[in-house]
Image (cartoon, rainbow, N blue to C red):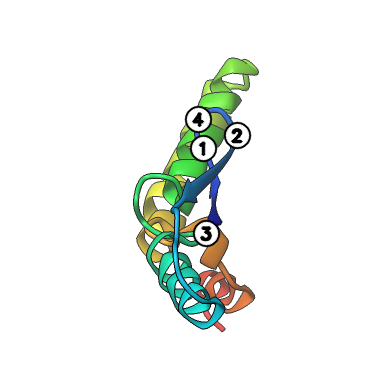
Amino acid sequence: MRVYVGRDPQTGHPRQRSRIFHGGSRAAGDALRDLVEKHGEGHRDGFGATVGQLLDRWLEQCERLNLSPTTIRNYRSQVKQTIRPKLGRIVLAKLTPKHLDTLSGE
């Protein structure tokens, strides 16, 4: 059995976890459910990128695009003071509209 565990944050390639199982279909279903709970998409085992990691990559991309130093400084300030404290640790796969509402104070 195989479980999709998200994309590698550096390469973007899909990642999977595999397990060989011997037994009946009911036991196999239980084993699969356990595998999904343990390693499913968004699990914090290094495969699920967080909002903070995405923001870091975005800021690096802004620098590579040669945006104005003032613009980059303003972006970094907003990320540091507003976005990262509220959303930085959330795994992207688990990000919801409700999380985004916390940024606007709703």
Q: Determine whether label 1 and label 2 are within 8 Å by CB.
A: yes
Which residue lies at the image location 56% right of the left edge and 35% below the top edge?
Answer: 58
Q: How many marks?
A: 4
Considering the numbered disc 1 on the image, is that residue within a helix, a strand or a loop? loop
| Amino acid residing under circle 2 | Gly
- Circle 3 residues within 10 Å: few <14, some 14–19, many ≥20: many
Q: Determine whether label 1 and label 3 are within 8 Å by CB.
A: no
Which quarter of the picture shows residue 21? bottom left
| Amino acid residing under circle 4 | Gln
Image quarter hosting the N terminus: bottom right
Q: Determine whether label 4 and label 1 are within 8 Å by CB.
A: yes
Q: Is residue 9 above or below residue 81?
A: above
- The residue where tag 4 is placed is 10
x and y percent of residue 28 in the render?
50, 72
Q: Is residue 96 above or below residue 42?
A: below
- The residue where tag 3 is placed is 41
Q: CA distance from mark 3 to mark 2?
A: 14 Å
Which quarter of the picture shows residue 25? bottom right
- The residue where tag 1 is placed is 8
x and y percent of residue 63 in the render?
55, 21
